[in-house]
Amino acid sequence: MYRSHTCGALRSEHIGTQITLSGWVQKVRDKGFMIWVDLRDRYGITQLIFDENRTPQDVFKSAQELGREFVIKVEGTVIEREAKNPNLATGDIEILVSHITLLNASLTPPFTIENETDGGDELRMKYRYLDIRRNPVKNNLIFRHNVSMEVRNFLSGAGFIEIETPYLIKSTPEGARDFVVPSRMNQGQFYALPQSPQTFKQLLMVGGMDKYFQIVKCFRDEDLRADRQPEFTQIDCEMAFVEQEDILNIFEGLTKHLLQQIRNISVSEFPRMTYDQAMRTYGNDKPDIRFGMKFGELNEVAQHKDFNVFNQAELVVGIAVPGAASYTRKEIDKLIDWVRRPQVGALGMVYVKYNEDGNLKSSVDKFYDQEDLKKWAEATAAEPGDLICVLSGPADKTRGQLSALRMELAERLGLRNPDEFAPLWVVDFPLLEWDDESQRYHAMHHPFTSPKPEDIALLDSDPGKVRANAYDLVLNGNEIGGGSIRIFDKDLQATMFKHLGFTEEAAKAQFGFLMDAFQYGAPPHGGLAFGLDRLVAILGGQETIRDFIAFPKNNSGRDVMIDAPSAIDSEQLKELNIKLDL
Ligand code: ASP
């Protein structure tokens, strides 16, 4: 037997008991006549004591040879600790060891296995198995497990069935590149790894499964922006005989359940906002509504004066930054430099200080008097003490720039409190999105999303105006879920493919199976998927999803621990009949 208890279990009520523990040596304190060892396992730390006078000689000698991360088994008696440690669950007791077995020695670990480690990111990833021994990483993985369990409890309780779908499939368009896998048995042919189980879950609805979910890996070969992983996990769901309202209700319920169970926070009904409103009010389709700074459009009150920059702009728009009227000239200049960085791309910024005494002082006083600026303050809901920041230019671009500024200022002002949760639904997304590079429309969500019936007529005349039955769940400025009501009619699906630039043959080759299925009594259906990694990180009050993944990839998509991707040997290539042209 390796253990009678774990290293987190023993308390003063166990004093006098004979026990067996196994674990890792966290720390050794050797005082010569007395040796203390902190023994660690997943459950905690227990102090062992070896005393020259009370411990058998050979056992004492073995203790002298212990090093960090050695794996040992000890037998002994629970005794009361003289100097109790109130910070440790087992801090009232220690183990007077009578037997010790060295189960495995360890090299000195390349970084300290403590809550605060001296190991840098790359090093910790290379030795991730050691990193996982550290409390912060271990606790994050346990936290993730708890979230997954609550997801399963809730959905299973609501009648959903978890069904696995294949990984070796054919391309599913979610807007990224596919990872491909060559087939040995079908030479010259390739599988694609699923960007999501989208088509399969729709086929499950045709199959009558009615309510499906799956906690599932998805694979997308994208240029890795910060905090993205080429393989990530979704809570993927689909339901039949539902309208948008049914889906929003169920998954609002799931989100509330998670906030309640995991964080003990109850939130009331989620606000809803159309995509259009979100863009106009926050310049962003995933607005962080934990704080205000709503956009005020200023065209009416700022144009038709002598300030040509504004007169020529499609949009003049501002935000009131709370309490920032006291910013010095230097601070404001820095802010202007910030919006002019290429990543943001504004040409400049006009500002108005709404001083505490009610006086308004702007960088464009030459063109606008107090009366004019008062109207700006009204439009941006500014209060005395606020700083109004105004950008202008092409509408979409300018909104994006002001959104970036709004988020940056919120960060600086400490308005993004990770322990506050502000979910909302963004609905009525556009169906199509113009892509400058390919000079054609792309599906904003994916090609299976249904247009709003009342907008179908616009498909030919004004495709960019067509709204979709598509929705996103947004939490604290992050899109944590998204989905849509699907097309379930073969002809409408064919029309959709046509608008996306597929020839009839191409659509048939790629998605014929789905359109075929639609001819055999496909029910109305819809669904959504949550990004589990991000959801878990946000629920955990943190930003980085890598911290909640056992074995994440780095920013170049590499696993530095197992060294993947890597070359394969020529035998394997030959079997696959693949020649490299490098
Ligand atoms: N398959 C979609 C995605 O991965 C989600 C959905 O429409 O259900 O974003």
Image (tube, helix red, strand yellow):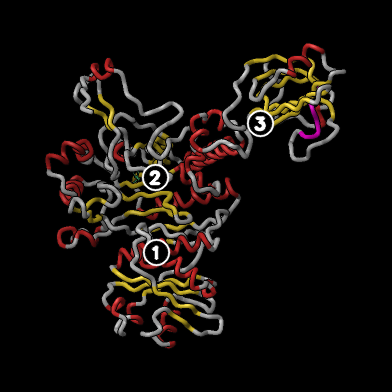
- Please rate how many residues cluster around mark 1, counting C-alpha atoms within 10 Å: few if below 14, some from 14 to 19, many from 20: many
Q: Quadrant of ligand 1?
A: top left
Would you place residue 581 above or below residue 139 in this image? above
| The residue stretch that appears in magenta | 91-96
Residue 174, image x and y in percent?
A: 30, 44
In this rendering, position of residue 216 left or right of residue 326 = left
Q: How far is the residue under mark 2 from the one under mark 1?
A: 34 Å
Q: In the rendered image, is residue 274 in sight? A: no
Q: Main secondary structure of the magenta part?
A: strand
Residue 257 colored in magenta in the image: no
Callout 3 touching callout 2 (CB < 8 Å): no
Looking at numbered disc 1 in the image, what kind of residue is underneath it? Val
Q: How far is the residue under mark 3 from the one under mark 2?
A: 33 Å
Callout 1 touching callout 3 (CB < 8 Å): no
Does the numbered disc 2 mark a residue whose Cβ is under 8 Å from ligand 1? yes
**Mark 2 / mark 1, whichever is N-terminal:** 1
Disc 3 secondary structure class: loop
Residue at figure coordinates x 62%, y 40% from the top left: 116
Would you place residue 532 above or below residue 306 in this image? above
Figure quadrant of residue 42: top right
According to the picture, the residue beneath numbered tag 1 turns out to be 339
Say which of 193 and 576 sits in front: 576
Residue 95 colored in magenta in the image: yes
Residue 12, image x and y in percent?
A: 82, 31
- Say the numbered circle drawn on residue 43: 3
Residue at figure coordinates x 39%, y 55% from the top left: 245
Looking at numbered disc 3 in the image, what kind of residue is underneath it? Tyr
Figure quadrant of residue 58: top right
According to the picture, the residue beneath numbered tag 2 turns out to be 529
